[in-house]
Image (cartoon, rainbow, N blue to C red):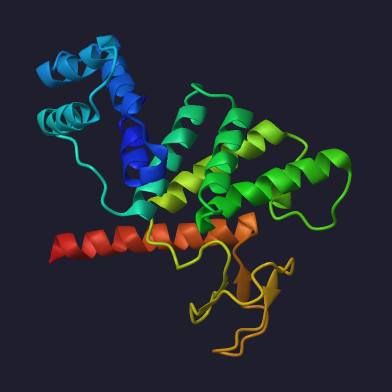
């Protein structure tokens, strides 16, 4: 169990259980970690009744000894944890459809966080394509006849998006290519573009639920981030 899993479950109080910490410590031992605090936490699995207070104290000791940092923002923790699931799938440690199921489970358990609509839309697209139904596909540019490859491509995009400062409520927004105005109005629309109410440019407002529009935005934000870092380095 990667540290990101108990870290996210911890910040999401309703999801963490005492044995999650102990399981994490035991997996660290199996992976070759020999930190004393990890040994002590892992040994709690031998107790008939695990002391939750003791486990909490030992977990904090592990975090300190291993130089780890617990997240403080729920949404940041969610994005990091979800990205890690995608990484596992891309590394071949998880099947593509298992990754989708995990993403949908997270969305269902946490009232469909905005960023997980990427996965909700992908699952709907793949189901509709397989069933021969549906007129609009948010991920239609990917070629839905190869579902597993679609999942991998979306996972890569998801990871890239989670590493960037995204607009609020992304991807359930419209964003103008010209003036960068955003709007969450009519965010269930199947239209690809519309006129921007701020600058008035026709078709400049892009529906971020469509893969190609997300790709364009992520590319732009990534380039801007690189330029900002370069400028800061020069200064």
Would you identify the image quadrant in which residue 127 lies?
Answer: top right
154 to the left or right of 19: right
For the point 15% across and 31% down, the residue is 57
Q: Quadrant of residue 38?
A: top left
Q: Residue at x 73, y 34 (%)?
A: 146
Which residue extends farthest right?
132
x and y, in percent, of residue 233 in the image:
16, 59
User: Relative to 66, is 70 above or below?
Assistant: below
Q: Closer to the camera, 40 or 102?
A: 40
Q: Residue at x 24, y 29 (%)?
A: 52
The answer to whether 25 is drawn above or below residue 115 in the figure is above
Please identify the quadrant where the C terminus is shown.
bottom left
Q: Quadrant of the N terminus?
A: top left
**Residue 161 location (% of width, % of height):** 45, 53
Q: Residue furthest front?
A: 49
Where does the image place residue 100, in percent across and percent down from the top left?
60, 37
Please name whichever residue, 153 or 46, is drawn nearer the observer in this view of the structure.
46
Q: How many marks?
A: 0
Residue 49, how many percent across, how many down? 28, 17
**Which residue is drawn at the image coordinates 45% and 68% (left, top)?**
168
């Amino acid at each position: 169990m990667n540290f990101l899993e108990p870290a996210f479950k911890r910040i999401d109080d309703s999801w963490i259980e005492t044995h999650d910490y102990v399981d994490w410590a035991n997996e660290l031992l199996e992976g070759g970690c020999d930190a004393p605090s990890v040994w002590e936490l892992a040994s709690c699995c031998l107790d008939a009744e695990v002391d939750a207070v003791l486990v909490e104290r030992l977990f904090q000791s592990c975090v300190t000894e291993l130089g780890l940092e617990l997240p403080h923002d729920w949404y940041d923790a969610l994005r990091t944890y979800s990205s890690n699931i995608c990484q596992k799938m891309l590394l071949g440690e998880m099947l593509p459809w298992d990754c989708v199921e995990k993403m949908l489970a997270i969305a269902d358990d946490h009232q469909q966080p905005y960023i997980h609509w990427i996965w909700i839309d992908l699952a709907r697209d793949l189901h509709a394509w397989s069933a021969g139904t549906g007129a609009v596909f948010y991920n239609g540019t990917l070629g839905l006849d190869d579902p597993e490859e679609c999942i991998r491509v979306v996972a890569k995009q998801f990871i890239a998006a989670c590493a960037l400062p995204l607009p609020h409520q992304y991807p359930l927004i419209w964003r103008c290519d010209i003036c960068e105005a955003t709007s969450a109005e009519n965010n269930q629309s199947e239209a690809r573009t519309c006129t921007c109410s701020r600058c008035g440019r026709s078709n400049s407002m892009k529906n971020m639920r469509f893969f190609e529009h997300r790709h364009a935005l992520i590319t732009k934000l990534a380039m801007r981030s690189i330029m900002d870092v370069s400028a800061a380095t020069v200064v």
